[in-house]
Amino acid sequence: SQTIHQWPATLVQPVGSPLSLECTVEGTSNPNLYWYRQAAGRGLQLLFYSVGIGQISSEVPQNLSASRPQDRQFILSSKKLLLSDSGFYLCAWSTGAGQPQHFGDGTRLSIL
Amino acid sequence: KQEVTQIPAALSVPEGENLVLNCSFTDSAIYNLQWFRQDPGKGLTSLLLIQSSQREQTSGRLNASLDKSSGRSTLYIAASQPGDSATYLCAVVSGGGNKLTFGTGTQLKVEL
């Protein structure tokens, strides 16, 4: 069966520090991968998605970037965090168009 | 731009009651609609996915319907239980890349 792992579960970082959140999927190959952010009092917003290694699409202009160095690995990064980057970050995968998306347990990021 | 609205924002019911959660979307040109459950501080659990050509899907005590032409979906929960307490999110895919647009959710509390 397929599983998705995100880490860390929680993270507290100072403003201006770098960020690296990792997401890996097991039990499937060539998945579509997604990063979402859920800010306090707001809905889930798609940040990035990837349909293959090295293929990244950005949905909103922001302080973050994403990379997919391996087929089942998706990384969310920032060089310098802002207060507005605080939120709950969720990674998801699907087998392709028209198929359900399955989510990880999320990373709660607090910026001080 | 697709917008998804969920009504009500919060709902409290006694155990055993049947209930309906509503979701509406502005652009009827969707590929599919997915209902999720989110427990506090956790990721999303996929409940049901309805393809644009389908009218409804059922899983146990859950039944989701889709009226694509009117831009509406409902999630029916039969014989509610305290364990059903969570936030319920609907999301639609209406563009390339299998990208989900989420509603802001309905927070459900089922009381003993």
Image: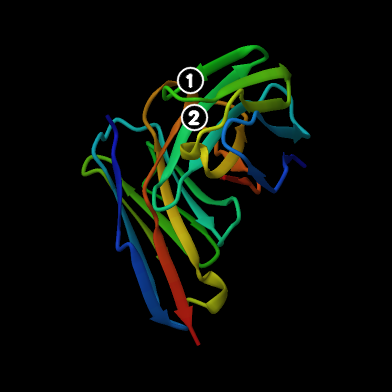
Q: Which residue is labeled 2 in the image?
A: A47
The percent position of residue B54, horizontal first and vertical second, equals: 39, 42
Residue in the foreground of this view, choosing between A8 and A83? A83
Which image quarter holds the N terminus of chain B? top left
- State whether residue B72 is above or below residue A15: below
The percent position of residue A111, horizontal first and vertical second, equals: 56, 43
Q: Is residue A96 left or right of residue B67?
A: right
Residue in the foreground of this view, choosing between B108 and A80? A80
**Hey, what amino acid is under mark 1?**
Ser
- State whether residue A92 is above or below residue A52: below
The percent position of residue B89, horizontal first and vertical second, equals: 43, 52
Residue at image point 39% right, 55% down: B105
Q: Is residue B109 left or right of residue B66?
A: right
Residue in the foreground of this view, choosing between B86 and B15? B86
Q: Which residue is labeled 1 in the image?
A: A58
Q: Which chain carries label 1?
A: A
Q: Distance between the residues labelled 1 and 2?
A: 6 Å
Residue at image point 69% right, 21% down: A30
Please indicate, yes or no, whether residue B71 appears anywhere in the rendered image: yes
- CB atoms at circles 1 and 2 under 8 Å apart? yes
**Hey, what amino acid is under mark 2?**
Leu
Q: What element carries label 2?
A: strand
The percent position of residue B19, horizontal first and vertical second, equals: 37, 71
Please indicate, yes or no, whether residue B77 appears anywhere in the rendered image: no
Residue density around tag 1, few if under 14, some if 14–19, many if 20 or more, within 10 Å: some
State the image quarter where residue A21 is shown: top right
Q: Are marks 1 and 2 on the same chain?
A: yes
State the image quarter where residue B8 is shown: bottom left
Q: Is mark 1 on a helix, strand or loop?
A: strand
Residue at image point 52% right, 57% down: B37
- First in sequence: mark 1 vs mark 2: 2
Residue in the foreground of this view, choosing between A65 and A24? A65
